[in-house]
Amino acid sequence: MRCLGTKSLNELIVQLPGTGHRAPVGAVIEEFQRGGAFQKATLEFIRAMMAQMSQTTLCNRLHIAEQRLAKWLLMCHDRSPSDVLPLTQEFTALMLGSNRVSVTQSAIRLQEKGFIEYTRGRVNMVNRKGLESFACECYARIRKEYPYLGRR
């Protein structure tokens, strides 16, 4: 198998604080080529990411800002050990392909509905079930692609 390079084609952004792992590219390629559990897990993750990208592209075209914000907050919460997410308006706008004003207005509406508490740089998940029911159907479709995240 020919190695396509040692650098990512994309810029990587860490969305939330936490832990991560790093391995030399050669070791990853070697383990992948063995065709065992690592290869299977990698391919399953790639499939899930492709489904997420496709669904998010459609979502960004079809759904209102509040629903898109709800979906993204739920996805962040799925990957966080805390109910408090350290998210700025600027970063949230970047991740949603939106602007800060739209993010602020959407967050205020979600707060008025009692789903979140929103303060500068912090989002507290108050009513996750309510947020799930408010979010567009894209959240459920994306979520089922990541069964290993567990259930909250």
Image: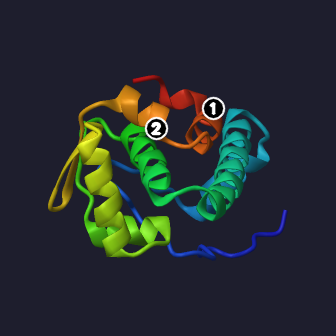
In the image, residue 126 lies at what x, y percent? 24, 33
From the viewer's perspective, tell me whether residue 151 is left or right of residue 42: left
Which quadrant, please, contains the C terminus?
A: top left
The amino acid pointed to by label 2 is Phe
> Does residue 57 appear anywhere in the picture?
yes
The amino acid pointed to by label 1 is Lys
The numbered mark at residue 144 is: 1
Residue under numbered circle 2:
134
Mark in the foreground, 2 or 1: 2
From the viewer's perspective, tell me whether residue 67 is left or right of residue 29: left
Depth check: 26 or 118 in front? 118
Which quadrant, please, contains the N terminus?
A: bottom right
Depth check: 92 or 110 in front? 110
Q: Earlier in the sequence, mark 2 or mark 1?
A: 2
Which residue shows up at 39% across the image and 26% down it? 129
In the image, residue 76 lies at what x, y percent? 40, 46
The numbered mark at residue 128 is: none
The residue lying furthest to the right in this view is: 1
Find the distance from the CA under tag 2 to the CA under tag 1: 17 Å
Q: Is residue 9 above or below residue 25?
A: below
Which residue shows up at 46% across the image and 38% down it? 134
Q: Is residue 140 above or below residue 94?
A: above
In the image, residue 70 lies at what x, y percent? 42, 47
Classed neighbour count for the residue bearing mark 1: other residues with Cα under 10 Å, few (<14), some (14–19), many (≥20): few
> Does residue 17 appear anywhere in the picture?
no
The residue lying furthest to the top in this view is: 151
Depth check: 12 or 28 in front? 12
From the viewer's perspective, tell me whether residue 40 is left or right of residue 114: right
Q: Secondary structure at mark 2?
A: helix
Which residue shows up at 47% across the image and 59% down it? 65
